[in-house]
Amino acid sequence: MGLINLDLLLTIDYVLVLFIYFVIFIVLSRKEKSLSLIAIVLGCLSITLYIVSREATFSMITLSNEYYCAITEVEQAATLAAGKTLLALYNGSSFSISYVLGGFTMLLFSIVMLKNRIFEKSIPLTGLIMGVLMFVPPTVGEIGIWISMVSLVPSLIWMILMSRWLFRTARTLTR
């Protein structure tokens, strides 16, 4: 439960989204090299920062074991302090910057998608909504948490639409 609480599934999701970003880049870079290149670089940077910010995901297992094995109250207190430090870093600058860069990535890819009309219009429109919502990371307080929850709706829709487009395109290419 601790791994799920510390975003293991979201980390896996981000790695999988990276593959989708590369597909989008390959498709769009033929017609719009500059914006596509900027988008893929921002996307890679966003995902890298996100993964770095999730340091606590596996480190907490080690700290949990150390706390369990601690003999003195001093050792327990030191382990708790280390855990609190990891949690402070968990939602720190790297995460917030990653979140906003992800928004820029979605905006740029969506703009290029709209210009080239290779994708169904619903995909870039959903991406634009998602990108704008990602300019407010969940770390900025209650409004950030609320907006990040709302952004999950267009994120899910975008992933479904992109998956459908990818499967349809793959089927067309294999015929």
Image (cartoon, grey):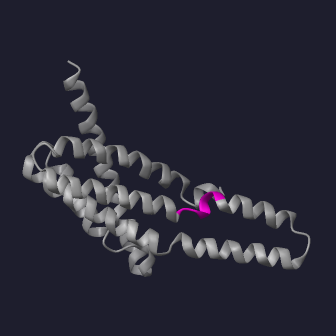
- Is 50 on the left-hand or right-hand side of 67? left
Instruction: Examine the rendered structure and indicate whether residue 36 appears above or below residue 80.
Output: above
Q: Check the image and name the residue furthest to the right.
A: 71
Location of residue 156 in the rendering, given as x and y in whole percent from the top left corner? 35, 52
Name the quadrant of the N terminus.
bottom right
Residue in view at x 45 percent, y 70 percent: 94
| Left-right relation of 28 to 68 | left
Magenta segment's dominant SS is helix
Residue 150 percent coordinates (x, y): 35, 66
Q: Is residue 108 magenta?
A: no
Residue 29 is situated, as x and y percent measured from the top left of the image, at 16, 46
What is the residue that sits farthest to the top in this orientation? 175
Q: Is any part of residue 154 visible from this angle?
A: no
Closest to the observer: 120 or 33?
33
Q: Quadrant of the C terminus?
A: top left
Q: Which residues are magenta?
A: 54-58
On the image, the x and y values in percent for residue 61 come to 71, 58
Residue at horizontal 43 percent and vertical 48 percent from the top: 15
Could you tell me how many numbered marks the image carries? 0
Quadrant hosting residue 4: bottom right
Residue 104 visible from this viewpoint? yes
Residue at 25% from the left image edge and 68% from the top image edge: 132
| As drawn, 137 above or below 173 | below
Q: Name the residue rendered at 44%, 81% in the picture.
A: 141
In the image, taking residue 107 as reference, residue 7 lies left or right, namely: right
**Which quadrant of the structure image shows residue 83?**
bottom right
